[in-house]
Amino acid sequence: MLVIVLKTIYRAFLLILFTGFGCAGVFAFMDDTPERSLAVASALSNARWQVLEDGFEVIHGQSETGAKLTAFRISSGKFSFEIDVQDHPKGERVNHIGERLEALFAINGGFFGETSTGELYPVGLMSSKGVPDGKAWRTSGGYLVLGKKIHIIPSFEGMPLYAREYVQTKPVLIEPGGHWAMNTNSGIGKKRSIICLRPKGEIIITLVTGTGLSLFEAGWLMRSTKDGGFFDCDAAIAMDGGGSTQNWVAGHPELSYRGISPVHNFLIMKRR
């Protein structure tokens, strides 16, 4: 009973606090918001976006229980994206590929498997430089499709064979149009890599580290503020997570995260 009372007081305190900051919408659905999502959202609401360069910003949030979130806000008109693959058959780390390809930013991509001799191969369908690889899931997950405009397409809509650059991954957290796509919450906190597309064309790339969040909890933060989220994504998809989660920012080792294992494929960003 005491725990329930304390949680109620805590939620009421947050509502008063963030109403004062003009952020009441973030907590409009506090009764439904997972506790760990709420804690990270409150930390983000007290933070500020920091400019790395024109069109490229970063924000940090960390909950008292140790879930860390770093998000990069990117203007799609100023940067280009591509899917690239390992240079070594047993995988590569994002800092190596970022430096090798003279990128500005790199993050791990889709899922992969390992042969008995340690070579990595894609799990799900992907295409880099117009060369498809892997086998498509027909219904689960979706595609991050690159081009003049970046799209997220659920797998059940079919393969994006018209595109040269795409990677299939899962799950889709928010379907295009801002439709919440998650039904269950495992409650298991892990590291996460997430791509979010905002309604006006901005891209949010998010890493969850520290004690981690479940996919449901991380996805909740991608929702619109009116639905209790933070980033207001029109669509969002999770990349491979757990030990694969890693990123690299040129000239900013403090913003880079090494991760545990080399990976097969990557999303990289360059200046236009």
Image: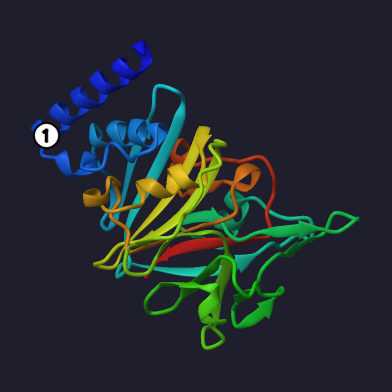
Q: Is residue 270 left or right of residue 107?
A: left
Q: Which of 132 and 19 lies nearest the eye of the viewer?
A: 19
Q: Position of residue 17 (x, y in %)?
A: 15, 27
Residue at image location 59% in from the left, 52% down from the top? 94
Question: Where is 185 relative to 116, above or below?
Answer: above
Residue 99 in sight here:
yes
Question: Where is 175 relative to 131, above or below?
Answer: above
Q: Which residue is mark 1?
A: 19
Question: Where is 190 relative to 171, above or below?
Answer: above
- Pointer 1: residues within 10 angstroms few (<14), some, or many (20+)? some
Q: Is residue 236 left or right of residue 129?
A: left
Residue at image location 45% in from the left, 35% down from the top? 254
Q: Position of residue 270 (x, y in %)?
A: 43, 64
User: Farthest bottom residue?
Assistant: 162
Residue at image location 38% in from the left, 32% down from the top? 35
Q: Position of residue 89 (x, y in %)?
A: 79, 61
Per the image, label 1 sits on a secondary structure element best described as helix
Residue 251 in sight here:
no
User: Farthest top residue?
Assistant: 2
Residue at image location 32% in from the left, 69% down from the top? 177
Quadrant position of residue 23 = top left
Question: Where is 209 relative to 76, above or below?
Answer: above
Q: Quadrant of the C terminus?
A: bottom left
Quadrant position of residue 92 = bottom right
The amino acid sitting under disc 1 is: Thr
User: Farthest front residue?
Assistant: 1
Quadrant position of residue 115 = bottom right
Q: Position of residue 248 (x, y in %)?
A: 51, 48
Q: Which of 78 and 119 lies nearest the eye of the viewer?
A: 119
